[in-house]
Amino acid sequence: MDSRTAGPRCEPMTTAHDVPADLLIAELASRIAEMSDITAPDWADYAKTGTHRERPPVQSDWWQVRSAAILRKVCMLGPIGVNHMSQLFGGPKDRGVKQNRAVAGSRNVARTIMQQLTSAGLITSKHNPAGTVNLGKVLTSEGQSLLDEVAHTVRPQAEERYPGLSNY
């Protein structure tokens, strides 16, 4: 039977790889805000996000936005650990007259968010075959389905903003 006449064309599922990060993270942050397992600790209002920052974040929902960004990074780069995650959220440290140096972001923020995502059932630890070494965090099926659902939701906005995206 000819594949062109086999029936209606099946549209592929949209994944987190198919939509821009800014649209995905904004919608994912609003979904994460509804979850009871992921909440900003008391110290989050006063903590800087790294030594390269002078002040704490001014956004009221920065914890949910960072949680969404970390969940997306686990999807894209997993298995990934807290140290590598904090390096991704780092930046240039102003050292006065000396040249800037790259520094990592706050490991405590990254660790706490990853622990909350684990307790919410969105990510889990991956171990080597012997079970002796923790290789990092990976998405669970619930985390993958949440990301795919959010990506499918923001796909029309992405196609509106980037018309060439509808070809893929």
Image: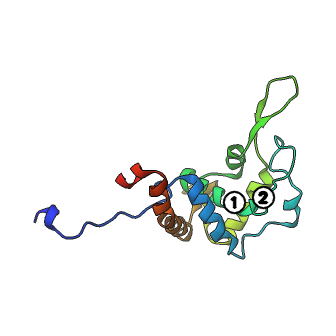
* Residue 77 position in % (x across, y down): 56, 50
Q: Which amino acid, mark 1?
A: Val
**Of the pair 60 and 128, the residue shown nearer to us:** 60
Residue at position x 69%, y 71% from top? 33
Residue at position x 88%, y 27% from top? 96
* Residue 137 position in % (x across, y down): 62, 58
* Residue 89 position in % (x across, y down): 71, 46
Q: Is residue 101 above or below residue 46?
A: above
Residue 90, quarter of the rendered image: top right
Does residue 124 appear in this view?
A: no
Residue 104, quarter of the rendered image: top right
Q: Which mark is residue 65?
A: 1
Q: Which mark is residue 59?
A: 2
How was this image coloured? rainbow
Horizontally, residue 4 falls left or right of residue 89, namely left
Mark 1 and mark 2: Cα distance apart in space: 9 Å
